[in-house]
Amino acid sequence: MLLLALAVLAPACTAGASGVRGKPGAAGVRDPYFPRLGNGGYDVTHYDLTLDVGKDAKTLSGTARITARATQDLSSFNLDLAGLKVESASVEGRPAAVSRAADELTLRPDIEVQDRLRRGRTFRTVVHYSGTPKTITDPDDSEEGWLPTADGAVALGEPTGSMAWFPGNNHPSDKATYDLSVTVPEGLTAVSNGVLTGRPATAEGRTTYRWHTAEPMASYLATLAVGRFETKTSTMAGGITVFTAVDPESAGASAATLARVPEVVKWEAAHFGPYPFSATGAIVERKGDAGYALETQNRPFFPGPPSVGLLVHEMAHQWFGDSVTPASWRDMWLNEGLATYAEWLWEEEKEDTPAQESFDEAYADDDNWAFPPADPPSASNISDPPVYGRGAMVIHKVREAVDDDERFFALLAGWTKARRHGNATTADFTAYVEKATGLDLTELWKDWLYGGSRPAADG
């Protein structure tokens, strides 16, 4: 009876005089640092992107087929897209009205398909778009989005850049599988996440590459590199595909490090649990084509020949960040602290440098004490030293508290198993550690994770 009364009093939330059902999805998920990123009211399950890259990779036309599940009754919903022009859109095969405010697209489905946007139902959206994809400058002045290279372009997405080349729900809390069909000028290669399906097909001076990512992926981890690459494909133990793409100018200097990809993956799996994906490898551009490395899923990106330490760091992200993805950008220390600690562990076991020495060096670095790793002061600080160095110190302190390496590594492997292909918050991690160890670590979290001052090193 109460539900019936509410329906009478509030028809706009069900079916009003216009016949519209539901209500608009939110234009943002209220991330603490990027509140307008992402969108409410639905969860994307799959992106199917067909992309046509123009000469010199300066222009792009695309069709995005987005499969999503409604998490509320929807009358309209938003997608994130920066710069590119929307030519048309449809929902469930019917034309949808599109309006735009900066990087926010609002799609209003035809009344005929409103019933298919009820909570719990799956629906499909198709967006046709084109234009010159843009480079996005982050709050910390780094660049992402669509980055021109010497012979093409590379798309990098952390934290906001994926919306520069495809429309979507651009927040790490919404993960999906992906298919990309990318057509480029003959002579260029298109490299993305996952596995290459079939052989590249060339016709009329254009070559098409098809990539499939079977495991859920956050949009910021999606990548596309277009250029002249030397590629290699092999299979390592467990049937994992290893695919590397290297700019010819970086090939010689990268060879020794890239040959160790299977070794690094095997070593990390022994410490962090089974490798969470069906593919691995790397994309290496020439030095100067981008300003940073990134843990793009299955295939980390490097702006020049990587060191072994950097390879260890970005590969560790396949567990910490890619499989277990932060629920918000406030939780980024879970990515970077654990990946940095992976470097310390590698140096301890492979280079006879105890993790305690790495801890001591990080502890002495004043830059690591600018703010608590779990609470960066602004969006411009989420990649600052405390997120990495002090984040790794938190993990070392947990190791000390556990006081048994077998139990400690079981703790890390248990974490990646419990949250495999999902999302996690800092509170999820601290609760997990305390439950798994039976320890009360309140003081550790207060001093090392959230504290504003430098505690005693042996505290």
Image (tube, grey):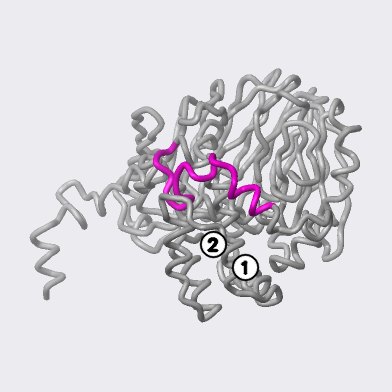
Let me know if residue 360 is in the magenta part: yes
Instruction: Write down the region rendered in magenta.
Output: 358-379
Residue depicted at 34% across the width and 31% down the height: 99
Residue at which label 2 appears = 422
Is 73 situated above or below 436?
above
Residue 297 visible? The answer is yes
Q: Secondary structure under badge 2?
A: strand
Q: Nearer the viewer, residue 195 or 437?
A: 437
Q: Estimate the x, y position of residue 136 in percent, counting from the top left.
A: 51, 27
Tell me where residue 285 appears, x and y as whole percent. 76, 30
Residue at coordinates 67% horizontally, 28% vertically from top-left?
290
Q: Say left or right for 136 vs 30.
A: right
Residue 68 forms part of the magenta stretch: no
Q: CA distance from mark 1 to mark 2?
A: 24 Å
Residue 399 tag number: 1
Of the residues under marks 1 and 2, which one precedes in the sequence?
Answer: 1
Which image quadrant for residue 416? bottom right
